[in-house]
């Protein structure tokens, strides 16, 4: 989903002028040959914190924070599927150590929470402050016992950009997917908000994504706004335009 696009605030200096910018809307248009599908995400804030995101595909994602400002819960409510997927995060020393996952059924008429089921949890391993591995435990049978479902590893460049991601079907198992990333040197507009890691880093902006299993290569053409934030990203596979992402901001001079 668009959780990897969940945005933050940032400030930058352009020709001696400083700006404070908050993303208002992200429009993601995906090509399907002769047709296209668009999903619009509207971002709502409480002060400078992201409070919730309203999507055009009947979903709303809500964010809660602990006293230190870390994301403590994400609730992903889908009124079309009558479900609410919740992640409860645990933090220690400024690092997210675990995320427990729940599925909550919604009443078809009132949209209130009804039955809750436990889906498993994610555990995170660090090298210093860098997340280097993630183990996913899932509950898939009536025993309600969580078993290892996937194992992910992450590598970074010197400034903290994620440059390689590999997922295995278990620890020391078969490779399920693997990607390599390349970046520009411009600031990513979403770097300042301390959101939970969900597969992407927000230091610089992706220029290239390579599927290491299939060899497919995706290139990212970035068009920047006058405040130096990405306003449009054109994503191509080979020479075919497969996706366009547009970002609208509200900016103020400091």
Image: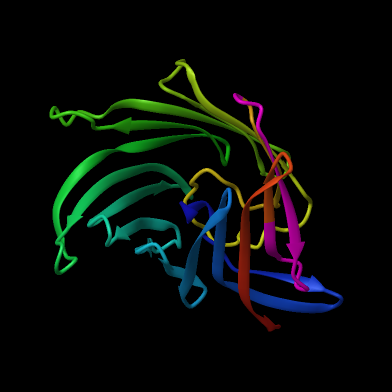
* Image x and y of residue 126, in percent: 52, 35
Q: Residue 57, position in %: x, y?
A: 39, 62
**Residue at 39% of width from left, 64% of height from top?**
67
In the rendered image, residue 15, in percent from the top left (x then y), is placed at 87, 76
Residue 137 locus on image (x, y percent): 32, 31
Residue placed at 54% from the left, 71% from the top? 25
Which residue in the rendered view is the most extreme toward the front?
A: 34
The reply, left or right, for residue 77 in relation to residue 67 is left
Q: Residue at 40% x, 48% y: name it.
A: 91
**Looking at the rendering, which quadrant does residue 121 occupy?**
top left
Residue reaching furthest to the right: 15
Nearer to me, 179 or 15: 179
Compared with 164, 6 (above or below) is: below
Q: 210 or 169, which is in the foreground?
A: 210
Q: Quadrant of the C terminus?
A: bottom right
85 left or right, relative to 241: left
Q: Is residue 99 above or below residue 191?
A: above
- Please check the rendered image and state whether residue 211 is part of the magenta-colored stretch, yes or no: no
């Amino acid at each position: 989903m668009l959780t990897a696009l969940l945005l933050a605030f940032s400030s930058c200096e352009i020709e001696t002028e400083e700006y404070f910018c908050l993303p208002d809307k992200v429009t993601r248009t995906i090509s399907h040959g002769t047709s296209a599908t668009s999903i619009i995400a509207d971002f709502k804030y409480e002060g400078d914190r992201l409070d919730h995101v309203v999507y055009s595909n009947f979903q709303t994602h809500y964010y809660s924070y602990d006293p230190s400002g870390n994301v403590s819960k994400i609730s992903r409510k889908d009124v079309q599927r009558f479900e609410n997927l919740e992640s409860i995060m645990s933090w220690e020393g400024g690092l997210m150590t675990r995320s427990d996952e729940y599925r909550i059924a919604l009443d078809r008429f009132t949209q209130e929470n009804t039955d809750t089921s436990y889906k498993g949890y994610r555990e995170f391993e660090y090298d210093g402050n860098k997340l280097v591995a993630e183990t996913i435990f899932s509950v898939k049978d009536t025993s309600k016992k969580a078993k290892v479902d996937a194992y992910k590893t992450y590598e970074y460049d010197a400034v903290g950009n994620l440059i390689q991601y590999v997922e295995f079907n278990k620890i020391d198992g078969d490779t399920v997917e693997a990607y390599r990333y390349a970046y520009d040197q411009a600031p990513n507009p979403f770097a300042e908000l301390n959101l939970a890691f969900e597969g992407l880093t927000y230091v610089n902006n992706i220029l290239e994504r390579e599927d290491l299993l299939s060899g497919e290569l995706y290139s990212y053409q970035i068009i920047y706004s006058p405040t130096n934030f990405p306003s449009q990203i054109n994503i191509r596979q080979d020479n075919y335009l497969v996706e366009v992402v547009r970002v609208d901001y509200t900016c103020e001079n400091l």
